[in-house]
Image (cartoon, rainbow, N blue to C red):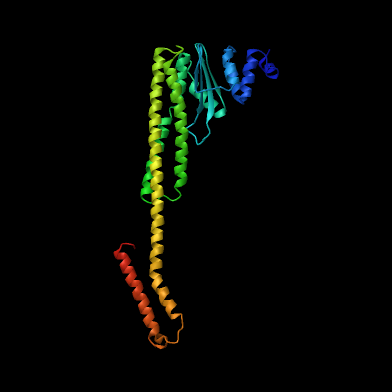
Amino acid sequence: MSFFENTRKPVGLGGKIMVAMMNLGHSPVARWGLRFLELTLDAKVLDYIHEGQIEAFEGFEDFDLIAFDWYDVRSERTAASQMLLYLDREDLFVFCEDDAAEDAAQAALLVPEEEALSNEQVLHRFFVRLLREDMAHLDRLEADISDGETEVLTGAHEAYLDRIIAWRQELLRLKRYYEQLDSIFDELAENDNSLLGKQNTRRFANLGNRMERYLNAVQSLRESVAQLREAYQSQLSIQQNDLMKIFTVVTAVFLPLTLLVGWYGMNFVGMPELHWKYGYPAVILVSVGIVAALVIYFKKKKWL
């Protein structure tokens, strides 16, 4: 039966794989993966995928299943794409959720014809290539956050809260991404089913150490962002306090003048200043004197 006939009426092992992939909603991934798949996968794999029990890593007697949410640090795309890897002693299959993940997987799996690599070596190179831009991305984040600290401390931080929120979300995504990869590399380094050679287990142990360094860097940046947010809020509080201080000074300056106007606005008959020809200039001078005295007082107290 041809491949296309099997899509209309799935039968046999190939049909089971087709149905399992479609049930996961990954039919584009299945079409790409099945082009390279000689239908020899263990039935446990099909049951495992069909039941939706995909963990970060599952090691069986004869094969390993690896699933993780891939995050592209090179683009502004924030959504993660799931990748599922199957590894046994003879085959390595990669299933991807969408076109972006498929393109990244194809680029990472590309091996020149003159190189003779085993499946486990290809798997190691696959992860190395997926992660080759991550350190540069973390360095850029660190530089941006450092510049942000300078801007906040110098007061040039208008509408800065959106950037802080974006950094927090980005670092949270990276934390989740590296945590799952760290778990996968630890499992591969333990090599409980002896599927990998000693040299490659050491390589995956090194990748696990790299993930720990990435996680430490992400945690350090998260702490920096938390401190930056506190500094930003402190600057906002200082600005609000300065504004309230100005309002207080203005109120204190005009309060005596308001009291003076209130007195002479009562229009009592026995107020001699109402008929004094120098009354108006006298009130002006008294008002100016009060304002000047209050300004001098506030400056001495460093409120102005």
Residue 35 seen anywhere in this rendered image of the structure: no
Outermost residue on the left side: it is 300
**Quarter where residue 269 is shown:** bottom left
In the displayed structure, does residue 154 sit left or right of residue 14? left
Q: Is residue 3 above or below residue 28?
A: above
Place of residue 189 in the rendered image (x, y in percent of width and height, measured from the top left): 42, 18
Task: Identify which residue is drawn at 47% across, 38% down.
Answer: 169
How many numbered badges does the structure rendering display?
A: 0
Q: Is residue 81 above or below residue 109?
A: below
Residue 121 seen anywhere in this rendered image of the structure: yes
Task: Identify which residue is drawn at 30% across, 63% down.
Answer: 301
Q: Is residue 237 above or below residue 91?
A: below
In the displayed structure, does residue 57 sit left or right of residue 283? right
Place of residue 238 in the rendered image (x, y in percent of width and height, measured from the top left): 38, 54
Task: Identify which residue is drawn at 37% across, 44% down.
Answer: 149
Place of residue 99 in the rendered image (x, y in percent of width and height, measured from the top left): 57, 28
Of 16 and 265, the residue lying toward us: 265
Of 98 and 11, the residue lying toward us: 11
Of 243 and 143, the residue lying toward us: 243
Q: Is residue 145 above or below residue 26?
A: below
Task: Identify which residue is drawn at 53% across, 33% down.
Answer: 79
- Position of the N terminus, as image quadrant, is top right
- Position of the C terminus, as image quadrant, is bottom left
Place of residue 179 in the rendered image (x, y in percent of width and height, measured from the top left): 44, 28
